[in-house]
């Protein structure tokens, strides 16, 4: 169940999000979760943030590309939420309302972690935008893949050229990781922290167990 702007609760698909710092293995595990759910005939839409619509993907490019001009954190925050409004209202909400589950690679927890804990923007500023853009809609379940920052960055570096966020200093990612962990600890009914430093097989074993619980309706909204 997900709660909607009118305050009514309707039968909808479940809204799952996957989060974590750089190199944590989100893309790898998103594919695992997709296959796991599809094997059990769950109607599923897989999408990502920033992005998920043509306009939001353009905003993603603007956000990620390296540039000489320093990007103001509030400007960054507003671009993230501009992309989110488009994505939420044209893709995510309609899918959930049709009973389709949505699996999203990052969502607003990334904003709290990167723009909040990482850049130092105030919680109240982010909460105001979250309320404006999402009203009452929140994920039913958020998997936070957690890893030592240096290990994750080494994986990210080995994979591809670094984007604007990935080029930040280790201290920035330590704050981001702390932001994720604090949110997960504050609301254990919605979040599951997964040790992503383990061998991939064990990470996926842990994720599979969480999904079993979700399908058995022991988790989520
Ligand atoms: N952002 C986003 C914000 O600042 N605010 C916001 O509100 C939002 C929504 C782009 C950036 O946007 C910022 C945060 C981000 O910096 P992104 O593209 O989702 O977001 O970010 P990435 O971190 O680049 O995500 P990816 O999914 O592309 O990379 P990952 O998580 O690094 O995942 P993956 O699967 O490519 O894994 C990296 C490598 O590790 C290996 C994989 O094979 C791969 O080579 N690996 C493992 N190796 C050993 N053991 C394991 N258990 C492994 N798991 C994976």
Image (cartoon, rainbow, N blue to C red):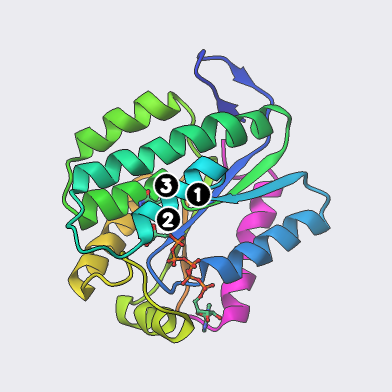
Say which mark, if any, is on residue 61. 2
Disc 1 to disc 2: CB gap under 8 Å: yes
Q: Is residue 85 visible?
A: yes
Disc 3 to disc 1: CB gap under 8 Å: yes
Residue for point 47% across, 73% down: 196
Q: Looking at the picture, how far across and down is residue 59, in whole percent?
A: 42, 47
Q: CA distance from mark 3 to mark 1?
A: 5 Å
Quadrant assignment for the C terminus: top right
Which segment is the magenta one? 198-221
Q: Looking at the picture, how far across and down is residue 134, in whole percent?
A: 44, 29
**Depicted 13 relative to depicted 160: above or below:** above
Is residue 216 one of those drawn in magenta?
yes
Q: 47 and 72: which one is in front?
A: 72
Query: Is most of the magenta stretch helix, strand or loop?
Result: helix
Is residue 80 one of those drawn in magenta?
no
Residue for point 37% across, 53% down: 62
Quadrant assignment for the N terminus: top right
**Depicted 179 relative to depicted 221: above or below:** below
Q: CA distance from mark 1 to mark 2?
A: 6 Å
Q: CA distance from mark 2 to mark 3?
A: 5 Å
Disc 2 to disc 3: CB gap under 8 Å: yes
Say which mark, if any, is on residue 59. 3
Q: Residues within 10 Å of mark 2 (few under 14, many from 20)?
A: few
């Amino acid at each position: 169940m997900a709660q909607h702007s009118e305050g009514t609760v309707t039968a909808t698909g479940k809204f799952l999000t996957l989060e974590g710092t750089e190199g944590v293995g989100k893309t790898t595990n998103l594919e695992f979760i997709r296959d796991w759910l599809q094997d059990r005939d769950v109607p599923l839409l897989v999408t990502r943030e920033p992005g998920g619509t043509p306009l939001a993907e353009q905003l993603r490019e603007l956000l990620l590309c390296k540039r000489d001009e320093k990007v103001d954190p509030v400007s960054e925050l507003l671009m993230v939420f501009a992309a989110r409004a488009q994505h939420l209202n044209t893709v995510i909400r309609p899918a959930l309302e049709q009973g389709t589950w949505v699996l999203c690679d990052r969502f607003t927890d990334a904003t709290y972690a990167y723009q909040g804990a990482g850049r130092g923007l105030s919680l109240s500023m982010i909460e105001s935008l979250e309320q404006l853009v999402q009203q009452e809609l929140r994920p039913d379940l958020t998997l936070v893949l957690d890893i030592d920052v240096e290990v994750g960055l080494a994986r990210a570096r080995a994979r591809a050229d670094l984007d604007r966020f990935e080029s930040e200093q280790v201290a920035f990612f330590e704050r981001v990781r702390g932001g994720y962990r604090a949110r997960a600890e504050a609301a254990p009914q919605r979040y599951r922290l997964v040790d992503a430093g383990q061998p991939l097989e064990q990470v996926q074993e842990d994720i599979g167990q969480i999904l079993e619980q979700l399908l058995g309706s022991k988790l989520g909204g």
